[in-house]
Amino acid sequence: MNIQTGSYYWPNTFPDAPAYPPLAENITCDVLIVGGGSSGAQCAYYLAKEDLNVVVIDKGQIGRGSTSTNTCILQYSGEKKFTDLVQTFGDDYITRHLQLCQQAIDDIEAACQEISYDAEFKRRDTLYNVSEEKDQLGLQKECEWLQERGAPVAWVTEEWIGNHYSFQKPGAIYSRNDGEMNPFIFTHGLMEFAHRNGVKIFEDTAMVGEHYEENIPVIKTNQGSSIRAKVVIYAAGYDAMEIKTEKKARFVSTYTVTTEPVDDFIGWYNHTLIWETARPYIYLRTTKDGRIIIGGLNEDTAKPEERDKKLVHKRDQLLREIHVRFPGITVSSAYYSAAFYGGMVDGLPMVGMYHPYPNSYFLLGYGDNGTVYSMVLAKLIKDRIVKGRSDDIKLYEPHRPLTKKRLYKS
């Protein structure tokens, strides 16, 4: 799958990342993780703490897939408002989803403190602004719903925004306890932690086929080797769709620019994360070394050639969007890329468990909060493997409830 094209900032922040050998022999294990991006690393991190024989394979190098294009804005709110999700799933269901996302950010922070590398994790506030007045009432209701559930959010006015930023908007949700980090270093840090605790990691080892012997998965690799595993976790990001298509998954094209370091963030209050109600939307964050990352302007195409031919135009458009909001900041592009971006049509990520793939889990942390979603799902899958059950995993199953009447029923 042609996932992305362009130039990537994150790998250049960690040029001496660890390397791992390809798999050259047949092996057996308790758990095989297919995929060495952030979601695979999150699974490896949790499972490394258990008394299990765990193996990770990646078709290329660790963190070199969509992890390299991940802007790694860590939020509990998502593209689809909680108040809209409630209409589909019910209030209790979505309140629990909110709690799991909030906990996942805490878990990411804890993991960053446990790994050997500085993943540049930092708590950030978020400004989620109204783009047009017609969006204001819906966003205010979203703010009220979050406040009722104890989320650290407040409604800020046009006057407040104008006093704190170099732009004005009709209003916004101001959220606390979100975050940001470097996803490439985070992924390598989790993998190094896992490797240090006994997890075997193999790069340049692609899965080329699978079959089942009495429901036991046997994975064939491009190295001519095979892996017999009691359980397989497919944490291959968007490449998972080449193994098993999920009808709820939808893909668009998205664009990202990382600037050269800037001298002064004039008009940018508290280095907040910024996004908006407009569709397609843009989002912004800063980096530890003083850059701006801006992304979005999604296009409804899943054809790589159509996506890529718009890259330069989108780069220039994103740079103009920075200038519109921050006319006092002078920027130039250092890195820019186009990539596929996936989500689920109903607004929630998914743990795929399918009859043709026994003893297998598909970790589909698709959506604008992919790193947060993957932390949620990796932990739930670990609980299911180790403890034999996870009450919350059913929130994210393929046949999850579509009405509140079916909430938590088997």
Image (spheres, helix red, strand yellow):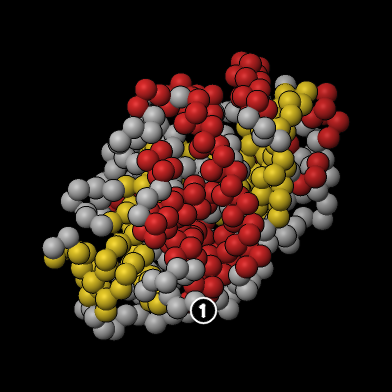
Which quarter of the figure is the C terminus placed in? top left
Hey, which quadrant is residue 263 in on the image?
A: bottom right
Tell me the residue at 62%/24% (across/down).
Answer: 145
Q: Residues within 10 Å of mark 1 (few under 14, many from 20)?
A: few
Q: Residue at x 58, y 28 (%)?
A: 278
The quadrant the N terminus occupies is: bottom left
Q: Nearer the viewer, residue 183 or 390?
A: 390
Task: Quadrant for residue 98, please give it.
Answer: top right
Left or right, 66 with reference to 128: left
Q: Which residue carries the number 1 mark?
A: 196
Q: Secondary structure at mark 1?
A: helix
The location of residue 399, given as percent across then percent down, is 30, 36
Q: Using the rendered image of the protein, determine whether residue 301 is visible from the camera's viewpoint.
A: no
Query: Is residue 293 found left or right of 193 in the rendered image?
Result: right
Where residue 90 appears, as percent x and y from the top left, is 46, 24
Circle 1: residue type: Arg
User: What residue is at 28 percent from the left and 56 percent from the top?
Assistant: 360
Picture layout, residue 75 above or below residue 31: above
Residue at (68% x, 27% y) in the render: 147
- As drawn, which residue projects farthest toward the left? 214
Residue 8: percent from left, percent from top = 55, 61
